[in-house]
Amino acid sequence: MAGNTLNISLIQADIVWEDKAANLAQYERYINDIQEKKEVVILPEMFSTGFTMNTTTLGERMDGPTVQWMKHMAKQHRCILTGSLIIEENGNYYNRLLWVQPDGVVGHYDKRHLFAYGDEHNHYTSGTKRLIASVKGFRICLMVCYDLRFPVWARNLDDAYDVLVYVANWPERRSLAWKTLLQARAIENQCYTVGVNRVGSDFKGLTYSGDSSVFGPLGETLWQESNNVAIQTITLEKDVITKTREQLPFLNDADKFVILD
């Protein structure tokens, strides 16, 4: 379905450590509170548990309760709901971003770059394929947290996209990198770039300032919020992407390359 605008709603929340019921209850309230037209609603990385390595206890299958909740909320609000959670499949655990449509169709992206500094690589299996979803004429590339540090994986090439989304649990002490790299990804890919992070603190004592952001294709800051729980809806315009790339056709000069696994 074509269209010139797309509403994205960002939910920057304080995640209750390893408490799925409490987290899903608060997200349900936040989603219900969105007054604007809901089209795509974005939750943080591991939104139901926090960034935990407790995979065997908290992991669930694709027919599990959190996935069913996402399907219910997407259907009830007639919107797309996305965010990452712990999924077990064939004995492996994935930090998996789900793209849940109101008709029950679910796409997914498994985080490629696992955060070895936080021991993620010893508990999760890395993904190998990007996910670029389509809605209302917008193509949306979906990524998770640490992927942000690796620009080659997000490079806008022949499968050109209009919006780049990162969901994260990115700690406050590296917030400068978070904000700077989000802006850089917008500039180099001439796209809207959206980062949805959490606030509060976790069981390990890490604090999170959020700094969820939306940048335009020239790197201009369209919205950013620090330290507070925040629910914000931003309207993206397809014409802005089209005009930017027509007037400044920099993507035509990009290097061609192949990523080897």
Image (tube, rainbow, N blue to C red):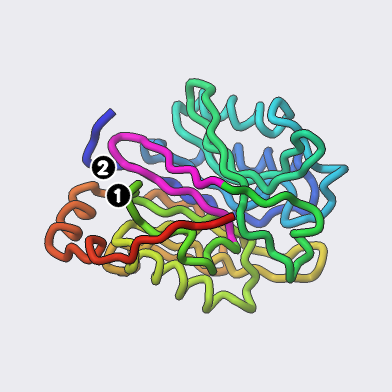
- Of all residues, the one furthest to the right in this rendering is 57
In which quadrant will I find the N terminus? top left
Type of amino acid at the residue the image marks with label 1: Leu
Q: Can residue 12 be seen here?
A: no
- Of all residues, the one furthest to the top in this rendering is 103
Residue at 73% over, 57% down: 51
Q: Nearer the viewer, residue 174 or 152?
A: 152
Is residue 183 shown above or below 141?
A: below
Residue at 79% over, 64% down: 119
- Of all residues, the one furthest to the left in this rendering is 247
Q: Nearer the viewer, residue 170 or 162?
A: 162
What distance separates the C-alpha of mark 1 from that of mark 2? 5 Å
How many C-alpha atoms fall within 10 Å of the one at disc 1: few (<14), some, or many (≥20)? many
Residue at 69% over, 64% down: 115
Residue 90 is inside the magenta segment:
no
Q: Nearer the viewer, residue 99 or 113?
A: 113
Residue designated by label 2: 5
How far from the left and from the top, in percent, is residue 251?
26, 62
Query: N-terminal of the two: label 1 or label 2?
Result: 2
Type of amino acid at the residue the image marks with label 2: Thr
Q: Which mark is residue 133?
A: none
In which quadrant will I find the C terminus? bottom right
Choose top left, top right, bottom left or bottom right for residue 20. Answer: top right
**Element at badge 2?**
strand
Q: Are marks 1 and 2 in contact (CB under 8 Å)?
A: yes
Choose top left, top right, bottom left or bottom right for residue 68. Answer: top right
Q: Which mark is residue 236?
A: 1
Write down the region rendered in magenta.
129-145
How many C-alpha atoms fall within 10 Å of the one at disc 2: few (<14), some, or many (≥20)? some
